[in-house]
Each structure stands twice: as C-alpha cells, then as structure tokens.
Image (spheres, rainbow, N blue to C red):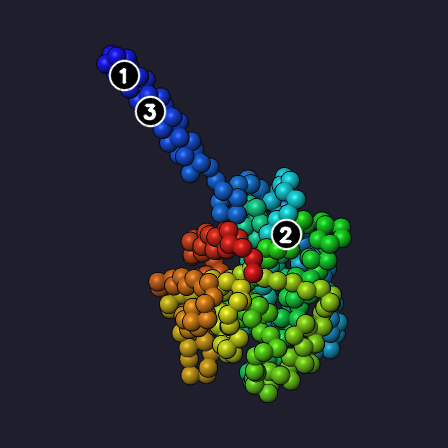
Amino acid sequence: MKRSLTTLSLTLAALCAGLLGSSASQAQEDRAAPRRYLNTVFPDYVRHGDILFAENLNNLDGKVEKLTLRVFEPKGDTAAKRPLVVLTPGGGFVQTGATWMDDFGEELARAGYVVAINRYRLSRDINSPEKFYDALFKATSDQKAAIRFLLKDAAGPNRFRIDADNIFIGGHSAGSITSMYTAYLDARNKLPDAAVASLQKNGGLDGNSGNETIKFKLRGVINLSGAVFDIDMLDAGEPALLHIHGDKDDVVPLGSNAAGLHGSATLHTRAQSKGLKSQLEVIAGGDHIDPADPKRCPECIPLMKRFMFTTMQQPAK
C-alpha cells in the first residue's frame, strides 16, 4: 500500500509539473505575443489623402474653404470595427503642414487604429481674446465636422469601419487646445463675453461645418503641449485625459501663467479633483515640439497607445 501511494504521488507530481510547465510556457507565449491597439501588429498601413469632409466660409479671406482629411488604416485588416483617433495638428491657429502628424497616423495604424488627421480653417493672428476665440471655435467646428463625417460613413458606406463607441481625439498645441474645447465645453460652462460671441458666430456648441445633427461620444482626449483658458470646463463624468508636456516648454506653460492659460499640470490636478481619469507625463528637458516629434520623444506614441488600450478596457460611460 505504501509503495502504491508513493507511485501515485510521483505520478501526480510529474503530471502537475507537466501541467504547470505547459501553463508557464503558454503564459510566456501570451506575454510575448503583440496585442492589438497596444503593440505594432500590422507590418504596413494604407494612407488615404485629401478626403473632403466639409466646406465652410473662412473669414481670413472671405472664401469658402475645402477641408480635407488624411486617413490611415492598417493594411490587410479584416476587423469589422476599429477605434477611431482624430488628430489635429498645431501651428498656433495660423499655419499648418501637409504632412504634420503623419508619423503618428502611420504608427497608430500599424497598431490597429483608424487615424484621421484633419485640416481646419486658419486665422491671421490670435493677438486678442476676440481673435483667439474666433480661431478656436472655427477649429472646433471643423474638428467636430470631421468626426461626424466619419460617423456618417460608418452608418452608411462604412468605408473605414469605425467603432462609434471608441473615439479618441487629440493633437499638438493648437490642435490639443481645439480637442479639449471640443471634448469638455458644454452648455453648463460659463465663458467670457469674447468667447460667447465667437462661439455663436461659429454655430454654437455644434459648430456649423456640417452634419450638425450627428451626435457623438468620446472615450478620451490626448493633450500634447496644450492648455485652456477656461479650466472649469473639466467636470465629472467626462472623457479620460492624457497629457504629455515638456518641462522646458516656453510656448505653452506646463502649469499656469499670468495670462490665465492653464497647461497640462494644472489640467491634470483639476481633472483628478473631479474624478476624471487623467494621466500626466512630463518630458524632462522637453520643449514645446518634443511631444509632436517621435524622434525627440520616442516614448510618446507608446504612451498614447497604452492610454487608449487601457481606456478601452473600461466600460464606456
């Protein structure tokens, strides 16, 4: 009997060792396997350029301006629905570039996202509150129109197979400012008179750049070197927020300045006080441009992917 028990014990030990070894090996494989939306899982991407999403009058020159998107998607992808990331480049509301932030579109598409980079109407300068808010609300109107254009496509031709429940927006500098006002400004917020006048001139909260009846919800906002004047916009129950900001930024403050501009650190504190998911990443020695340049900030795009990946693990509000 004793010998039988010894034999059984050895057999069970061997079996358990085999099972544990198999589990450990499988766990290692699982850990090593790239995960969509977090890692690069597609070797290539497809770029669709100059997609017209809206037309609107620009008071810069009194002409109707054609507004276009550049869309990046993973090449060979068969998923029925993919998260959408709308990126709006910076430029101080007065300039833009034909390829600004394309490197973000390429890298995020390889991770499985659909990325749209939108143009918006520019202004001559932002040297007064009236001019700043006019430039801002032209940009938010255009950004909202870009989101709605893609949602309209998802409900119809479905060219880009957008997941309407997982939409992220963001940008750099002026594009980030635009994104935060798009995401957080609502009818509850009190604005200065100059802002109220400019907002109404540009179609109110819905804007006037097209498809205003289409509603959307955002999962998160990516703030690269951005700030807001109206910090009370951030309130409970609103989209998650990722801030990436250089501590040597001499254009947009990391904290707050005498002009009342509130940068990433102040925004992070406000968001946390309201119970919003907020992540602050400060680039040591980084200037204003670093968060928008993957060569100078190689960790920035991975931080964005991690933020969106983890946000999508949580139930949508």
Left-right relation of 246 to 234: left
Q: Quadrant of the N terminus?
A: top left
Discs 3/2, front: 3
On the question of residue 163 being in view, the answer is yes
Provide the residue designation for mark 1.
5
Q: Mark 1 and mark 2: span between their CA atoms? A: 58 Å
Q: Position of residue 241 (x, y in %)?
A: 49, 63
The residue positioned farthest toward the front in the image shown: 1
Q: Mark 3 and mark 2: span between their CA atoms? A: 44 Å
Left-right relation of 208 to 227: right
Provide the residue designation for mark 3.
17
Q: Quadrant of the C terminus?
A: bottom right
Determine whether the residue tagged by mark 2 lies in a helix, strand or loop: strand
Q: Give residue 266's quadrant in the image.
A: bottom left
Image: 15 above or below 72: above
Residue at the location (48% across, 52% down)? Answer: 310
